[in-house]
Structure formats: C-alpha cells, structure tokens
C-alpha cells in the first residue's frame, strides 16, 4: 500500500490535498478545479418519472442540469466538458450535478 501511495505521488508531503486533486485523471475523466472533461455513456434512470445522466468512463454518474434533447438517448457515447455545480442540489441523488459546457457524440 505504501509503495502504491509513493508511486502514485499521493503521499507527497510537498503538495496539499487540494493541490493533488487540482488535476486528477481517473479513467477517462479529467478534473481540474470545478471543471471536468472526458467520455462516458448517456444512461436513462427511471427515478421520479425518468431522466438522463452520463455515466463517465470512471464509473461515476454525472447528472447534467442542461443535457440537450439531442443527447437524451440511452447508450449514446459522448465526450463532454462540464462544470461541477456544488451550489445546486438534486433530489435524484444519483451523482454529482454538472452543467454541460461542451458535448459531442463519440
């Protein structure tokens, strides 16, 4: 465990936790501050009448507050850039709420 920690640079005493998380690459999702970008698949959830979200290639679900109707199709593979919206809550609670900045089909 310690060796993995050292190899990943996660135990570096030179960087604060915030600095280490400033640009983290997980799967195909890149996070930098409150922005993230990467790839994933659109998924339909049947909670509260149904809605669409993006399951990132990092395995996490991102709940877009502004997913365009053209992308609201289960199974669509997408590349997206989004802003994390920690100031917005959701009763669906499937993942982090995001505001899509750019999206395209892959």
Image (cartoon, rainbow, N blue to C red):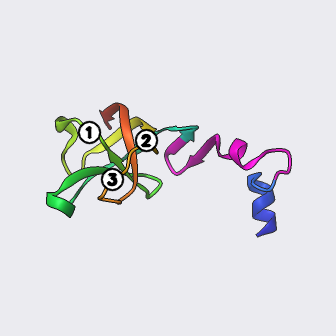
Q: Could you tell me how many numbered marks the image carries? A: 3
Whole-number angstrom distance, CA of label 2 to CA of label 3: 10 Å
Q: Secondary structure at mark 1?
A: loop
SS type, badge 3 = loop
* Mark 3 and mark 1: Cα distance apart in space: 15 Å
- Are the two marked residues, 1 and 2, in contact with CB atoms closer than 8 angstroms? no
Is tag 1's residue or tag 2's residue first in the polypeptide sequence?
1
Region of the chain picked out in magenta, as a range: 12-30
Helix, strand or loop status at disc 2: loop
Direction from residue 76 to residue 54 in the image, left or right:
right
User: Is residue 77 positioned above or below 58 on the image?
Assistant: above
Asked where in the image residue 106 lies, by quadrant, the reply is top left
Q: Residue furthest bottom?
A: 1
19 relative to 48, above or below:
above
Q: Residue 95 in the image: x percent, y percent?
A: 39, 56
- Which label was assigned to residue 67? 1
Q: Does 71 sit left or right of 24 as displayed?
A: left
Q: Where residue 18 sits in the image (x, y, percent)?
A: 69, 45
The residue beneath circle 3 is 90
For label 3, the crowd category at 10 Å Cα-Cα, with few meaning under 14, some 14 to 19 and many 20 or more, is: few
Residue position marked by numbered label 2 in the rendering: 85
Q: Left or right of 76: which side holds 1?
A: right
């Amino acid at each position: 465990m310690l060796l993995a920690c050292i190899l990943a640079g996660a135990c570096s005493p030179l960087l604060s936790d915030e600095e280490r998380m400033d640009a983290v690459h997980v799967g195909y999702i890149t996070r930098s501050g409150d922005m993230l970008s990467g790839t994933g698949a659109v998924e339909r959830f049947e909670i509260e009448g149904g809605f669409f979200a993006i399951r990132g290639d990092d395995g996490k679900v991102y709940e877009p507050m502004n997913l365009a109707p053209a992308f609201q199709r289960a199974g669509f593979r997408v590349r997206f850039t989004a802003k994390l919206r920690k100031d917005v809550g959701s009763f669906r609670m499937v993942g982090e709420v995001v505001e899509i900045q750019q999206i395209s089909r892959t």
